[in-house]
Image: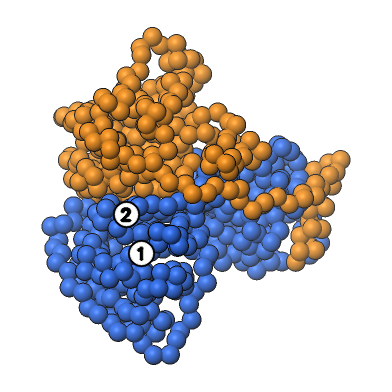
Chain colours: A orange, B blue
């Protein structure tokens, strides 16, 4: 059986689960300032998990691509610790705040440079801009069959079969490979990575291949920045929480039961 | 030419509620641009929906009828939409940020050489250059950004329940049929089957009892189900919700998910059990009338948006709460 090559696109972002107090809006510079560690965007982790499960059942390898201005080796090596075979960093100052279409153009160039592949997986949307476009645009640019919002993915012969979200439940669809699939969280969370494994990967001597714009982008003039006219804080969502104290759980539960009775 | 065009979505032969909201914001943009509002409907037999659309005040209804548009096969729909847009040449094209719009929007924008902004909560016209200013929550809802994009067609998908729907008007707009050339060969993705599932309609609930990672295990939802039953005796419709993490862990199906990529809800009472309150979850429930949080971590986000809080292990609180609720009833 031929070896399958799966490419996963993973974005590095500030932790979207960060406490509200660690997030502020710099209106002047039009930037969201997040005082939290960098992580891999959650839906992209789901995409990696889907790829890992696919390669358990068949002969395959996984390449993870990450594109950004300033990427962290430490954050992204996690994908290798999880079981990906290769990580390529697409890093350049010019990649700061690109619009979705430009990110897709650049990723398409990187994928063309890689050459052979069977399946491209992306998260359904990134946890910073929540745009939900790059995967779909990438499929259009590469003229690939495209399946949006996968809940489950399998490979059968030359086809990918996907359980795709549907308003009534789900739809099972099939596409010939190469194809692109965007992954939703129903696929499952990224497997647990032991600390020892993570540390081993971080200490690993192997350097991560890093491509700058000049290495792979064919028409750099086509890349455009997002044009943000204004950035502001959302209306305050905070309320004054009344804590229901008590010496025992029973006492607290009793107070809460009374709250429910009042709200009835 | 230069119309503000919206994509009408047809559900069971009739225009859906979100299309009426799109007509609402579309009408405002058309007035600001001093152009006309039109609506496009597609399907194998969209005649009823087209007739219905014509009574909601657009200047024109465009209708595309083709047997291959019976089901939603994105590649066929995209080809039809692309051809329709080439004929209509809209200045602005809006879709719902719906199941269909999420997929069609980016892909159609790419084909039309346009830049799309998704999930917009406001749209206005820049008086200088007549481009559409697109307001959208970003960073899970931590910030509100206004974007401007160049391009021949100004495209956006629009969040539900933000804009007021239009009312029916006297008279009916002209309905123009647009012919499209599509064939089955365009469809590389084949539908094998659509499996209907029992889907909870969280947005219809009076009370939602929601669980997250803090439950620690799938069995936690059994306890929440007991609470749901107990509350059902006093409140109308009580349903189980969850955070994204609970779905990721495989504890519960995604139709229960509350938040940006789940369902956005505002029930009378929202009970958050073991949910720390990632911003993408909070934006989906923060407009609930009363919010009750149970969590072991007093510093978690959920308490910041809650009206009532209990800092304790839910496994100790919920059984006691059920007993007390029964005592009181």
Measured Cα–Cα span from mark 1 to mark 2: 10 Å
Q: Nearer the viewer, residue B185 or B57?
A: B57
Residue A108: x and y in percent read 26, 37
* Quadrant location, the N terminus of chain A: top left
Q: Name, please, the residue furthest toward the front.
A: B128
Residue at point 71%, 45% (across, down): B303
Q: Which residue is mark 2?
A: B151
How crowded pointer 1 is (Cα within 10 Å; few <14, some 14-19, many 20+) is rated as many
User: Considering only vertical position in the picture, is A16 above or below B172?
Assistant: above
Q: Which residue is mark 1?
A: B92
Q: Is residue B150 left or right of residue B287?
A: left
Q: Secondary structure at mark 1?
A: strand
Residue at point 36%, 59% (across, down): B155
- The quadrant where residue B36 appears: bottom left
- The quadrant where residue B55 appears: bottom left
Residue B229: x and y in percent read 65, 60
Chain ID for label 2?
B
Residue at point 80%, 63% (across, down): A262
User: Considering only vertical position in the picture, is A18 above or below A229?
Assistant: above
How crowded pointer 2 is (Cα within 10 Å; few <14, some 14-19, many 20+) is rated as some
From where the camera sits, is residue B9 visible? no
Q: Secondary structure at mark 2?
A: loop
């Amino acid at each position: 059986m031929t070896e399958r090559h799966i490419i996963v696109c993973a974005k590095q972002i500030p932790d979207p689960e960060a406490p509200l107090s660690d997030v502020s809006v710099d209106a002047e510079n039009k930037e969201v300032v997040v005082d939290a560690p960098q992580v891999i965007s959650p839906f992209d982790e789901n995409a990696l998990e889907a790829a890992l499960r696919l390669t358990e059942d068949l002969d395959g390898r996984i390449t993870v691509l990450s594109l950004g201005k300033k990427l962290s080796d430490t954050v992204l090596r996690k994908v290798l610790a999880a079981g990906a075979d290769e990580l390529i960093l697409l890093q350049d100052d010019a990649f700061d705040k690109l619009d979705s279409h430009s990110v897709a153009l650049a990723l398409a160039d990187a994928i063309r440079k890689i050459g052979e592949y069977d399946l491209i997986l992306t998260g359904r949307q990134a946890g910073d801009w929540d745009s939900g476009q790059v995967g779909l645009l990438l499929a259009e640019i590469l003229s690939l069959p495209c399946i949006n919002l996968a809940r489950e993915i399998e490979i059968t012969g030359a086809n990918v079969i996907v359980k795709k979200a549907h308003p009534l439940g789900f739809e099972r669809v099939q596409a010939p490979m190469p194809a692109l699939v965007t992954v939703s969280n129903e696929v499952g969370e990224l497997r647990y990575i032991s600390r020892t494994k993570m540390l081993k990967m971080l200490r690993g001597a192997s350097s991560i291949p890093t491509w700058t714009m000049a290495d792979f982008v064919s028409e750099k003039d086509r890349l455009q920045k997002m044009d943000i006219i204004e950035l502001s804080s959302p209306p305050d969502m905070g309320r004054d929480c009344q804590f229901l104290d008590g010496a025992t759980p029973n006492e607290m539960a009793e107070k809460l039961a009374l709250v429910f009775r009042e709200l009835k | 030419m230069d119309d503000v065009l919206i994509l009408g979505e047809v559900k069971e032969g009739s225009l859906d509620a979100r299309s009426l909201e799109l007509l609402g914001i579309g009408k405002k943009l058309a007035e600001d641009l001093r152009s006309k509002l039109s609506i496009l409907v597609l399907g194998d037999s969209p005649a009823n929906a087209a007739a219905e659309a014509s009574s909601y005040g657009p200047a024109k209804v465009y209708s595309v009828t083709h047997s291959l548009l019976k089901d939603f096969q994105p590649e066929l729909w995209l080809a039809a939409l692309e051809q329709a847009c080439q004929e209509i040449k809209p200045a602005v094209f809006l879709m719902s940020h719906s199941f269909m719009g999420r997929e069609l929007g980016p892909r159609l924008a790419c084909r039309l050489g346009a830049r799309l902004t998704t999930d917009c909560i406001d749209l206005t016209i820049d008086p200088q250059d007549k481009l559409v200013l697109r307001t959208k929550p970003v960073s899970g809802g931590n910030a509100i950004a206004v974007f401007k994009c160049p391009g021949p067609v100004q495209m956006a998908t629009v969040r539900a329940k933000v804009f007021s729907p239009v009312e029916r008007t006297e008279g009916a707009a002209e309905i123009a049929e647009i012919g499209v050339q599509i064939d089955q060969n365009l469809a590389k993705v084949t539908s094998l089957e659509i499996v209907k599932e029992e889907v909870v309609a969280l947005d219809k609930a009076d009370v939602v009892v929601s669980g997250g990672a803090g439950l620690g295990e799938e069995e936690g939802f059994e306890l929440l189900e007991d609470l749901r039953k107990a509350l059902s005796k006093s409140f109308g419709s009580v349903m189980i919700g969850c955070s994204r993490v609970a779905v990721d862990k495989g504890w519960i199906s995604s139709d229960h998910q509350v938040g940006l990529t789940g369902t956005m809800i505002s029930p009378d009472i929202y009970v958050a059990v073991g949910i720390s309150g990632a911003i993408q979850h909070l934006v989906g429930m923060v407009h609930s009338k009363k919010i009750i949080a149970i969590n072991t971590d007093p510093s978690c986000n959920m308490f910041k948006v809650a009206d009532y809080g209990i800092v304790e292990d839910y496994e100790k609180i919920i059984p006691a709460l059920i007993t007390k609720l029964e005592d009181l009833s």
